[in-house]
Amino acid sequence: MKRLPIGILGSGKGSNCRAILECIRSGGLDAEASVVISDVLEAPILDIAREFSVPNAYLPPGQFRTRLEPQAEEELVKMLREAGVHLVVLAGFMRVLHAPILRAFPQRIINIHPSLLPKFPGLEAWKQALAVGETVTGCTVHYLDEKVDHGQIIAQREVAVLPDDTPESLHARIQIAERELYPAAIAEFCGKYAGSNPSL
Ligand code: GRF
């Protein structure tokens, strides 16, 4: 069986990364985590990679706050290519990616967002859902494009908003849903990859 080589990018605690690596370890996902890369030196996601013996690296992001310096983005493409990555999986990567990487991995970069897109793009989407009194929110796996939290939707999972929800309780339930949805969405790519032409 041809295993899908994935590269995981994250800036924070890495709960989605852990769920994906656990799913691979338990045989639920025919993927191989080729590399985990973070723009934050002390990010727990890098500790998780080490715990699972996955090659990992810190990518110095440069001087900007919300995106990578162009040179850093080129370096990221190089690292992913050298690791043989086919699918780039964003798991809490807090910088907006641009043309160099989008061109290098067309329709092969996916992200997970804590709302039912196109509703509530941007930061703290669960707070946005609570603020307008939604009764249902959820999470979305989507392809990355030039706009933030915008590309073609791959899969969604609904999460009910309960009358006594706080931002924390709602966010926690959305994250539980994310940890199921993301591996399931990646599994679809594994199926296509296993049946694909070796040149792809
Ligand atoms: C997730 O909630 C995801 O929706 C958002 O960033 C968060 C990352 O969490 N894009 P973690 O680092 O996977 O725990």
Image (cartoon, rainbow, N blue to C red):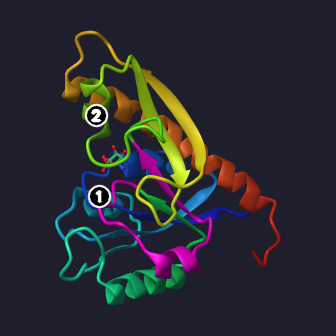
- In the picture, which quadrant includes the C terminus? bottom right
In terms of depth relative to the viewer, which is nearer, 147 or 47? 147
In terms of depth relative to the viewer, which is nearer, 10 or 166? 166
Q: Can see residue 9?
A: yes
Q: Residue furthest bottom?
A: 71
Q: CA distance from mark 1 to mark 2?
A: 26 Å
Residue 192 relative to residue 144: left or right: right
Q: Nearer the viewer, mark 1 or mark 2?
A: 2
Count of number-bearing discs: 2
Label placed on residue 45: 1
User: How far from the left and from the top, in percent, is residue 31?
Assistant: 60, 58
Label placed on residue 136: none
Is disc 2 placed on a helix, strand or loop? helix
Q: Can see residue 1?
A: no
* Residue drawn where x is 21% and y is 77% of the image: 64
Q: Residue furthest front?
A: 132
Is disc 1 placed on a helix, strand or loop? helix
User: How far from the left and from the top, in percent, is residue 148?
Assistant: 40, 58
* Residue drawn where x is 23% and y is 57% of the image: 44
Density class for disc 1 (Cα within 10 Å; few <14, some 14-19, many ≥20) is: many
Q: Earlier in the sequence, mark 1 or mark 2?
A: 1
* Residue drawn where x is 66% and y is 55% of the image: 189
